[in-house]
Amino acid sequence: MSDEILKVENLSTTFKTSAGEVKAVEKVSFSVRRGEVLGIVGESGSGKTAAMLSVMGLTGENCNVKADSMTFMGENLTPGKIKNLRGDKISMIFQDPMTSLNPVLSAGWQLKEILKQHKWRGNIHERVTEMMTRVGIVPAEERIRHYPHEFSGGQRQRLMIAMSVLCGPELLIADEPTTALDVTVQAQILGLLREIREASGMSMILITHDLGIIAGEADRVIVMYGGHIMEEGTVREIFKSPSHPYTVGLLRSVPKPDKPRERLIPIEGQPPDLLNPPKGCPFVKRCAEAMKICLHNKPEELSLSDTHKYSCWKGMKK
Amino acid sequence: MLKVEGLTKYFETPSGRIHSVDGVSFTINKGETLGLVGESGCGKSTTARTIIRLYEPDAGKIIFNGHDITHITQREMLTFRKKIQMIFQDPYASLNPRMTAGEIIREPMTIHKIPKDEHSSRVNHLLKLVGLNSEQAGRYPHEFSGGQRQRIGIARALAAEPELIICDEPVSALDVSIQAQIVNMLEDLQKSLGLTYLFIAHDLSMVKHISTRIAVMYLGSVVEIAQSDELYNRPLHPYTVSLLSSVPIPDPEKATQKHIIPLKGEIPSAINPPSGCKFHTRCPKAKPECRSVSPKLEDKGNGHFCACPFA
Amino acid sequence: MKPEDFLPLTVEEREGAEILRPSKTYWADAWLRLKNDRAAMIGLYVILIVIILAVFGPVFSRYEYDGMDFNVSNDPPSLTHWFGCDMFGRDLFVRVMYGARISLSVGFIASFISLFIGVIYGGISGYLGGRWDNVMMRVVDVIYSVPAMIYVILLMVVLGAGLKSIFITMGISYWAPMARMVRAEVLRIKNEEFVTAARAAGASPSRILFRHIIPNAMGAVIVTLTFSVPGAIFTEAFLSFVGLGVSAPMASWGVLSSDAVPAMAVYPWQLFFPAGAISITILAFNFLGDGLRDALDPKLRK
C-alpha cells in the first residue's frame, strides 16, 4: 500500500461552542493515492473543511481532533510532524485568496519567506520568479514587488497556488479554490492546477460543492453530509450509479445545461442542525427513503465494488 | 412590461468615473423570465438597482407598463415600488436581525397602506405560500436556515402583490440542494401569481434553467440577447461562447470531452473601458476595426440579438 | 434487526426527528450569553450592590453624613465605625455611601445626557452623510479636542464650583465620542442589504432610521454607555480631587479622597476606602462593558 500517500482512519473532530458541542466530523476514513485527485463534495456544515483542517493540524483551540491513525507517506502524522510538513510536503489553498495573503507584505516577500522557512537549498529568488511565471503572473521580475491589493481576484488565487506548490508538495489540499471566482477565471485556475499536477505528479484533495467541477477534475469522490461520509467511489461510479439517497438527490437537484429543461428535483427539508444531530443517519430527516431503523441507528458501510462504498440502511433491507 | 433604453449609470470615485452601466437596452414581456448574466463587475446588479431607482440613472429611459419612471420623484415612484419588488442575494444580510419574520413580511403592507386588519391573515397566507408555517412568524432571522431566510425574503417581495420581481442572485448564497427548492418555488409562484422575473445570476446553468430569454452583459454593456435554449445551443458573441464553454457540466464523460475556450488576460477596468468593442482586448476573433467601432445589438434572426458584426 | 425496522418512516416520525430550538429574541440571547460571562456578572452584581448601598445605605445608618463627633475623630475602622472616622469624627462608611450617590448620579446623568445628544447628533450626521456629515463631524472634533478641564474652569468662573458646573461640563464634552460611535454605526448599517431592501420596498427615511438603523445600533450604544459611566465617575473624582467639584459638607468619592491625602501617612484608611470604592466601581463597569460587548456583538452571532 505504498501507493497511498495519505491515509486517515476514523477521524473525529468536535468543536466546543457556547451553545454546546458540535460534532463536525465523525469517524471519517479515507486515503489519497499518489497522483490522484480526490474530490470531496458536501454542502456547508458537511464537515469537509473541518476534516481537512484536522489533517493539517490547523483547527483552533476549542477543537478536539481524534483519529485511530493518520499517516502521510507511511509516517505517523503527529502534531509536531505536521508542522514541518505543512507548506512543504502538504500544502493547502483556501477559498478566499484575499484573506490568506498578508496585505502589508509584498507578494515576493511572502513567497520567499516560505522557502526560507523550509530551508530551501537552491536560489530562492530564481525559484520564486520561476513559480510566478509558471502560474502566469508575468513579468515576474516586476510583479514580485507588488502588494496583494495590486492583484485581481484571479491573480491572487494564482499567487496562492504558486505559494502552495513552491516547495514541490506531494499533496495539495484545495478548499473551494474557485468558489469566489467567475466561471471564466475558474476555468483558468482549474486548468492551471491540472497543468501543475501533470508536470509534478502531485496528489490533490479538491473540496467543493460544485458537482460540475468534481465531474471534470476528480478521479475519486467522497460525498459528505452532516460530518459523515455517505458515499465513496470513482467519479464514474458516483455520477453514473449513485447509491446513497443523498448522492442521488444532490445529482437530481442541479440543472443540467446540456439537456432539455426539466423541473429540478430538490432535496426537501433543511440542512442538519449540528448541535442536535439525529441519532441515526444524519440524512434521515430529508431522505425520501427513510425507514424506522434510520432514526436511531447509524448505518454501516457497504461495499459495491473495490472502490465503491456507501453507508445506508437501504442496502441492508433484503 | 418593462422597457429599458440606453440605461447608463456612472459612479464618480477618486480614481475616476466608473462606467458601471453603459447604454443597456432590453425589454421584459409580461409573464416571462429574463435572465441577466455576466461576471462580477459587469454591472448586472447596478442595472437592476438603477431600474428600481435605488440609484439615479445618468442617461436612458426606464418605461414600466407604459409609464416613464426614469426621472419621477421618489414620492411618485412609491406607487411603482408596489409593482416592482426585489429579492436579494444574501439571505443573512437582507433581513433586519431585530425584526421577526412576521414584521419583515408586514413592512411592505404598512408602507403601501394595505388595511391593517388584513395584515395578519396575509402574513400567514404568504408564509404558507413560501413553505413556512404561521407559527414561525414570531421568530427572528437568525433562527432560520439560509434557505428559510430566502423564503422570508420572497414572502416580503410578494407582500405588496407586485407584477415584476427582480431576483438579484437569489440562490447563489445557498447550498446546492436548497437552490433547487427555491428555484422550483419561484417557478411555481410565477405560474400561480402570473409574475414576471428579471433573474440576475452568474451561474449560467441555473439561469438557463429558469429563464425564457437571457441577456449577457460584459463590462456594462449587453453583448447578446436570445431565447435561452437558442443562446445555449447557438451562442454568437465570442464572449458568450467562451463563457458557456467554461461552465462545468455535472457529467464526468462530457466534462472530459468538453473544449474550453479560455479568455486571455484579465477583465479591463470599468474606469477606463477599452474603446470600440469593449471585448476586443480579450476577443479571440478581434479585428483592427473592433478597436474603434463600438458595435450595436443587431438582429441575427429568431429574436437573437448580438453586438458583434462578425458573429 | 427486525423486518419492521425497514418500514418507511411515517410523517409524524420524521417531524419528531426535527428538534426545534426554543425561540429567543436578540436580547434574551444576549442575556444568556452575558449570564455565562463570570467577570461581567460579578461586575453587574457589584454595581447593583453599590447602587443599593448608595440609595438605601445612608437611610438605615445610625450616623448622618454631616454629623460630627469629635470624640471619635480620626478613629480607625472598628465595629461601630466600619470604615473609621475622619478628622471631624464623621462616620466614613456613611460618607462613602453618601459619596456614591453623588458619584453615581454624576456618572449616570452625564452618560444619559451624552446618550441623548450623541445618538441624535451622530444618527443624523451618519444618515445624511456627505457634506452635512463632514460639517457636523468637524464640530465634534473641535469639542473633542478641548480638554474637559478648560470647560470646568470656564464654567466655574460663571457659575461657581459645584455639581451644576460638573453636570454641564460632562454634558458638553461627553456626547462627542458617543456621537462619533453612533455615526460610524449608522454609516455601516446604512449600507447593509436589509436597508437597501427597505428602500426598494419604498420605506420613508424616518422609517429606515427608526425601524432599521437605530435598533441595530443599540447594542453598540449600550456598550459605549457602559464604558462612559466609569469615565464620568472618574472625571468627577478627579475634578473634586483638585478642588473643582462639590464642596463640604457634601461628599463625593473624589472629595473624600482629596480630604484624606494630607493625613495619608497617619490615617491611611481615610484614603483607602473612598479610593477603593472608585476603583471597584470603575472596574465593575469595565467588566460589565466587556461582557456586554461580547454578548451584543453581532459578528459572534451566526
Image (cartoon, helix red, strand yellow):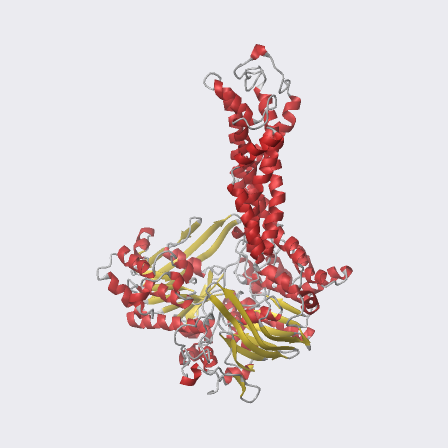
- Which quarter of the figure is the C terminus of chain C placed in? bottom right
Q: Is residue B165 left or right of residue C291?
A: right
> Looking at the image, is C226 positioned above or below residue A54?
above
Q: Position of residue A92 (x, y in %)?
A: 37, 61
Residue with the most extreme bottom position: B301
Q: Position of residue C247 (x, y in %)?
A: 59, 24
Residue with the most extreme top position: C71
Instruction: Determine which quarter of the picture holds residue C12.
Output: bottom right
> Looking at the image, is B203 positioned above or below residue C195?
below
> Looking at the image, is C128 positioned above or below residue B221?
above
**Count of marks overlaid on the render:** 0
Residue B38 shows up from this direction: yes
Residue with the most extreme left position: A122
Residue shown at 51%/75% (left/top)? B204
Instruction: Determine which quarter of the picture holds residue B115.
Output: bottom right
Residue C189 shows up from this direction: no
Residue with the most extreme front position: C157
Q: Position of residue C252 (x, y in %)?
A: 58, 26
Q: Pick the residue in front: C129 or B307.
A: C129
Q: Is residue B75 left or right of residue C265?
A: right
> Looking at the image, is A93 positioned above or below residue C59?
below
Q: Position of residue C237 (x, y in %)?
A: 54, 30
Residue shown at 67%/69% (left/top)? B72
